[in-house]
Amino acid sequence: MLIHGKKLIGLPVYTQGGQHLGHVVDLEIDIDSQSIVNYQVGNFNPIKNLWGDKLLVNRQQVVSISAERLVVEDNVKEAAAAISLNAKAEAPASEAMATSTLNAVEKN
């Protein structure tokens, strides 16, 4: 079965357990293999999507795709939350490094 990219964007995304996660808002395509690597899931409202968090779903986490919905593994949201927490924990260190680099440049 084929599905056009236009129909993937906006497709509702649910976990196997039935939890609504949002809608497909973008795709990441590997140009070498010409295949979708990740689906970006978020709020389909473009204004809210500018500031809202997006969930990145790898194609290996997709259970099924139909014209009505994309179904992903139940653990997708938990895995994304763990990655997000790690990124937030690392952010202060990189901000401090950027500030010290900027200060050093300004002194010279």
Image (cartoon, rainbow, N blue to C red):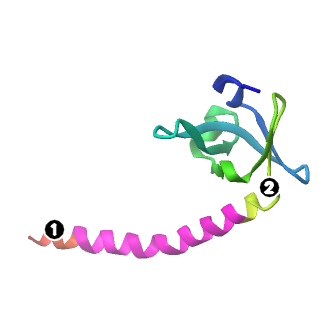
Whether residue 83 is situated above or below residue 9 in the rendered picture: below
Q: Position of residue 40 (x, y in %)?
A: 63, 44
Q: Residue at x 47, y 37 (%)?
A: 31
| Mark 1 residue crowding within 10 angstroms, few (<14) / some (14–19) / many (20+) | few
Q: Position of residue 59 (x, y in %)?
A: 67, 48
Q: Residue at x 67, y 61 (%)?
A: 80
Q: Position of residue 35 (x, y in %)?
A: 57, 38
For the residue marked with disc 1, what is the amino acid? Val
Q: Main secondary structure of the magenta part?
A: helix
Whether residue 60 is situated above or below residue 85 in the rendered picture: above
Mark sitting on residue 105: 1
| Residue hosting label 2 | 73
For the residue marked with disc 2, what is the amino acid? Glu
Q: Residue at x 77, y 27 (%)?
A: 1
Query: Mark 2–mark 1 contact, CB under 8 Å?
Result: no
Label 1: state its secondary structure: helix
Q: Over which residues does the magenta segment extend?
A: 79-102
